[in-house]
Amino acid sequence: MKQKVIVYSEMPEDLVENLKQQFDVKYYKNCNAYTDLLPDLEEAEGLIGSGLAVDRNLLDHAPALKIVCNIAVGYNNLDIGELTKRGVMAANTPGVLDDTTADTIFGLLLAAARRFTELDRYVKEGKWKEPVSEAQYGIDVHHKTLGIIGMGRIGSAIAKRAHRGFDMKILYHNRSRHKEAENAFDATYCSLDELLQKSDFICLMTPLTPETRHLIGDREFRLMKKTAVFVNGSRGQTVDEAALIRALENKSILAAGLDVFDEEPVAADNPLLKMENVVTLPHIGSATSETRYAMAKLAAENLTKGLLGECPPSLINREVLQK
Ligand code: 8YV
């Protein structure tokens, strides 16, 4: 009998077909909570998709589960401790989205500095009646200082663009030193406070963990330059959003570029949506056809290998193999 697999997010049809050849696939294109999956959860050995909270509640209903595959690099939706305790493998999709996500984040940075979205509205609303003046000027990006919080794969891809393309000076803060980025992009390691004080642009790229929740709040915004542009490409909860709103209202920073929010989709009455100096995106870091396909393919490979008794290429909790 084929092993039962639940696909809980939309996935390219050819990849679903491949999975169907090997497994008994239950495809839920729209799933908001694990309770939607209850008809199949009891017997499921594999779970693949993005964003579903895989916690104790779900796991209590999934006693046969062997592997959970995120179609995402971030895995704050997975309770890794609980999965490992129960001997369930967890996998994500690192690497394949680095360049695409770095492009998005650098685009946000440029858009916020040069006021692209605000001035796009200005043109479309018929307000462009004469040559632009100081009122429409932005600030330069090239030759400025970029602070990257979280120098992982995506952070490094941002550093590469900034250093090689825009002649920027790179500061970074990370759990550990990143010698490759130091050598390749002349990146300088510094404390979080020093980075916040010295950077013209700040990109927050750290994964969401208990340690990074609300990493940036009132105190941190106060440390930033009044001319700083803050970009969040990690998770909404790494920032105290109320503090960000205060910082923008009090003009203690210049502008922000946000791909992620505390609540997603963002509520229509969120004050950030009314601010001209905030560029907002609907969490599209990795959202290109090519990259989303590559992520789904890697996740499917993780799933297949895991269920066939091989080591998934991007297994997160290697400890389960020792059990
Ligand atoms: C999306 C992401 O969360 O990979 C991640 O961690 O942030 C994004 O790519 C996800 O893949 C789609 O919902």
Image: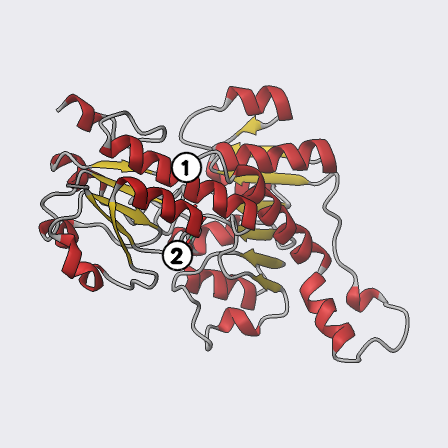
Give residue 188's quadrant in the image. top right
Tell me the number on the disc at residue 298: 1
Q: Nearer the viewer, residue 74 or 302?
A: 302
Whichever of labels 2 and 1 marks the residue nearer the N terminus, that label is 2
- Asked if 243 appears above or below 65 in the picture, the reply is below
285 relative to 140 in the view: left or right = left
Can residue 16 be seen here? The reply is: yes
Q: Nearer the viewer, residue 142 or 152?
A: 152
Q: Residue at x 44, y 68 (%)?
A: 266
Residue position for label 2: 10
Callout 2: few (<14), some (14-19), or many (20+) C-alpha neighbours within 10 Å? some
Which amino acid type is shown beneath numbered disc 1?
Leu
Q: In which quadrant will I find the N terminus?
A: top left
Q: Position of residue 252 (x, y in %)?
A: 57, 59
Give residue 115's quadrant in the image. bottom right
Q: Residue at x 19, y 41 (%)?
A: 2
Can residue 204 be seen here? The reply is: no
Which amino acid type is shown beneath numbered disc 2?
Glu
269 relative to 90 in the view: left or right = right
Q: Position of residue 279 (x, y in %)?
A: 60, 62
185 relative to 138 in the view: left or right = left
